[in-house]
Image (cartoon, rainbow, N blue to C red):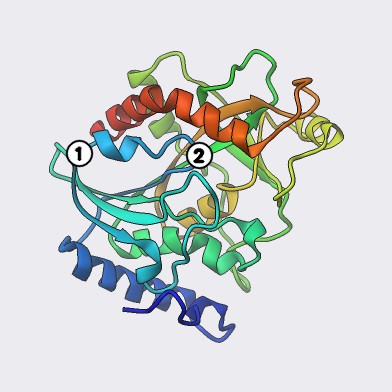
Amino acid sequence: MPSTTSPNPLDDPAADPFEVAQRAAAQLAEVTGAERHDIALTLGSGWGRAAEVMGETTATIPAAEIEGFSASGVAGHSGTLRSILLPTGKRALVIGARTHFYEGHGVRRVVHSVRTAAAAGATTMILTNGAGGIKSTWRPGQPVLISDHINLTAASPLEGATFIDLTDLYSARLRELARTVDAGLDEGVYVQFRGPHYETPAEVQMAKTIGGHIVGMSTALEAIAARQAGMEILGLSLITNLAAGISKEKLSHAEVLQAGKDAEQELSELLAKIVAKL
């Protein structure tokens, strides 16, 4: 198993990122004892407690022990990979070690967790995050569904002449399934900025003008990689704050963490019930 100080193979331009993902999935199967995982979840800010209530955790490992993964660089992320046996008999892989694009490690490392999950057998990818809300009717602590995204990172996980249709990237079927758990779930278009700075009020207004409702620094690149891998995708944002200029308050990461903490119980129950229906 690679040490946390070993060079990351994804930093080698000559490396095949899908081969790295296959090796990572093989290591994951060995250390978890689970031959395959059916569902994968990336738990962003505020969503982490869901792993505690959705089923029986049979293995928890530091993500950096698996090839291609990095230690989590952001407060509020566990930095672990967790194998959970669901009451349905299916197995979920919970990813608490998201690599953000703004960390500067490159897109391959941002989407490695998604590609590893696909290589491990997962056909459903649930992507969650904490984000700013543009709709003034939303409140901090409110979960919303992602219906589509706008990628403002100027990057893509696709390499070369790889053309992938993103027309229905965020599954309408899974959004409807989520609404059988909570009929009041609103939805919106997620706009991924590069970060790590928060958006200016002018940038938020730009996002609103081009059709955005949610602003954040993750998810879009991961969703593209999940589609390339043939996975069905459900996206969920926790509105941690109203975005700059929508709210008159200044933004802080502490506010994001607090909003997530305050909403933990509601979010964990919601996500566990959704997963139980998959």
Residue at (71%, 52%) from the top-left corner? 194
- Relative height, residue 143 to residue 184 (above, below): below
Q: Quadrant of residue 274?
A: top left
Q: Quadrant of the N terminus?
A: bottom left
Nearer to the camera, 118 or 228: 118
Q: Is residue 238 visible?
A: no
Measured as percent of width and height from the top left, residue 85 is found at 17, 46
Q: Position of residue 45 (x, y in %)?
A: 50, 39
Q: Residues within 10 Å of mark 2 (few under 14, many from 20)?
A: many
Is 1 situated left or right of 212 in this image? left
Question: Residue 247 at x, y = what percent?
Answer: 75, 21
Residue for badge 2: 45
Disc 1: which residue: 55
Separation (CA) of disc 2 from disc 1: 20 Å
Query: Mark 2 or mark 1, which has the lower sequence index?
Result: 2
Q: Could you tell me which secondary element the residue under label 2 belongs to?
A: loop
- Residue at 55%, 51% (x, y): give it: 74
Specify whether 97 is left or right of 37: right
Res 29 → quadrant: bottom left
Q: Is any atom of residue 45 visible in this view?
A: yes
Question: Pointer 1: residues within 10 angstroms few (<14), some, or many (20+)?
Answer: many
Q: From the image, which quarter does the C terminus lie in?
A: top left
Amino acid type shown at disc 1: Gly
Query: What's the amino acid at mark 2?
Result: Ser
> Is 155 above or below relative to 3?
above
**Element assignment for label 1:** loop
- Residue at left 60%, top 65%? 107
Please identify the residue farthest to the front as the structure is shown.
Answer: 254
Residue at point 71%, 50% (across, down): 195
Against 137, residue 219 (above or below) is below
